Image: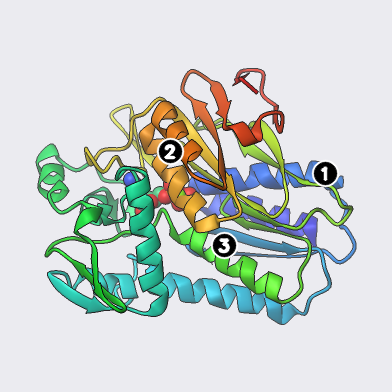
């Protein structure tokens, strides 16, 4: 089961559009590392299922316990339900309906209400570097759901006036209010939320060893079946370089990466990537190539990896250090790797073109 799923992923890579290339390359890195660990033999009880039609990426659930097939179906149904609620690419999603009903209070489900409150919390924690109200500007850069259009400075300035999480308020139970013209985009948050929900379903069903790979964002349940930690490798965060840069050992933790090499387009020799600085409306241009956040709290880690990438090394490090339960790996454009205190001594360099600092 294991090798075929690796082949399916390689096939998907060939078939995917360029703006999905990043997510899949993160994923290959992970599978290579798992492959090294297991020697590519199928451990007893391993069942692995991949789907590439959800959340705009390839999702692989690998369970190392004996479980009924319906458990996989339950997980994928739940991911589909999350996409149906949260996707801005679907006109009938709850978020799209909310976006069409700004300028007053709008009633949302318990699920979206709780998620939006968390999103606003992480927007505050990051000083607005992570901002789910990036929608109006993000829509200028997207065409038919793909990040591929360079807007004019005038367009960006006009839409920036509608960006600002402080104007998202919660006037009553399950009520959300935004100023007219604001639009939410939960793209930096949705995979983390889906991972968290699937993790919880598997734990409730007694799963003890599993590897969840959502487009290269990872959660590891328990240890590997042999009792050792999972080793998760991080891809070198440079377009066109599929080597691995470093590896960390984890169990019961997520490994969420945001980087400028992920989804992007090139125009007149300039690369434009999909993580925007909400202060400028342009792709974040910090001193970082990527940020990886490691935590048991998956949705927060997803938000914080995006935020850290926008903030840059110094401010990103300060943000993570202030928060309990999150560690991070920052890879800079100078090809240096910095890790937070809790990861010191736990990160192994795999690429001699990079330097591991203060480990
Ligand atoms: P990925 O989902 O590709 O792993 P991220 O988690 O960093 O990467 O999310 C990037 C997505 O988040 C973008 O495609 C867009 O939908 C949205 N986004 C971009 N910039 C920001 C930002 N500064 N704050 C919140 N969301 C953002
Ligand atoms: Mg994110």
Residue 180 in the image, given as x and y percentages of width and height: 11, 65
Among numbered discs 3 and 1, the one appearing first in the sequence: 1
Quarter of the figure that contains the N terminus: bottom right
Camera-side residue: 152 or 186?
Answer: 186
In front of the other: label 3 or label 1? 3
Disc 2 to disc 1: CB gap under 8 Å: no
How are the colours assigned in the image?
A: rainbow
The label on residue 37 is 1
Q: Secondary structure at mark 3?
A: helix
Q: Write down the residue under mark 3.
A: 195
In front of the other: label 2 or label 1? 2
Q: Write down the residue under mark 2.
A: 319
Report whether residue 144 is seen: yes
Asked whether, in this view, residue 345 is left or right of residue 41, the answer is left
Cα–Cα span, label 3 and label 1: 23 Å
Please give the name of the residue rendered at 31% of the width and 55% of the height, measured from the top-left corner: 132
Cα–Cα span, label 2 and label 1: 33 Å
In front of the other: label 2 or label 3? 2
């Amino acid at each position: 089961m294991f090798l075929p799923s690796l082949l399916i992923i390689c096939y998907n890579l060939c078939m995917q559009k360029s703006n999905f290339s990043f997510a899949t390359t993160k994923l290959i890195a992970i599978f290579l590392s798992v492959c090294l660990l297991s020697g590519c033999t199928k451990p007893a009880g391993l069942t692995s299922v991949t789907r590439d039609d959800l959340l705009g990426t390839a999702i692989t659930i690998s369970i190392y316990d004996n479980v009924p097939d319906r458990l996989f179906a339950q997980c994928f149904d739940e991911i589909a339900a999350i996409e149906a609620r949260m996707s801005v690419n679907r006109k009938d999603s709850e978020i799209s309906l909310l976006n069409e009903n700004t300028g007053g209070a709008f009633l949302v489900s318990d699920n979206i209400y709780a998620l939006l409150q968390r999103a606003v919390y992480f927007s505050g924690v990051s000083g607005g570097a992570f901002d789910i109200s990036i929608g109006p500007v993000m829509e200028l850069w997207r065409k038919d759901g793909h990040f591929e259009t360079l807007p004019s400075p005038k367009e960006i300035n006009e839409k920036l006036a509608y960006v600002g999480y402080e104007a998202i308020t919660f006037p009553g139970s399950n009520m959300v209010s935004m100023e007219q013209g604001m639009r939410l985009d939960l793209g930096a948050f949705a995979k983390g939320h889906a991972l968290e929900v699937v993790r919880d379903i598997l734990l409730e069903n007694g799963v003890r060893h599993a590897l969840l790979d959502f487009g290269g964002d990872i959660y590891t349940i328990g240890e590997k079946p042999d009792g050792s930690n999972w080793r998760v490798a991080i891809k070198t965060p440079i377009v066109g370089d599929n080597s691995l840069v470093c590896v960390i050992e984890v169990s019961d933790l997520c490994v969420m990466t945001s980087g400028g090499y992920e989804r992007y387009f090139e125009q007149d020799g300039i690369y434009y990537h999909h993580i925007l600085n909400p202060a400028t409306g342009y792709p974040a241009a910090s001193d970082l190539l990527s940020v990886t956040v490691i935590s048991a709290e998956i949705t927060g880690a997803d938000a914080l990896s995006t935020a850290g990438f926008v903030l840059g090394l110094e401010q990103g490090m300060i943000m993570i250090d202030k928060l309990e339960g999150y560690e991070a790996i920052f890879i800079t454009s100078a090809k240096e790797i910095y890790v937070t205190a809790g990861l010191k001594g736990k990160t192994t360099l795999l690429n001699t073109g990079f330097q591991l600092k203060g480990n």
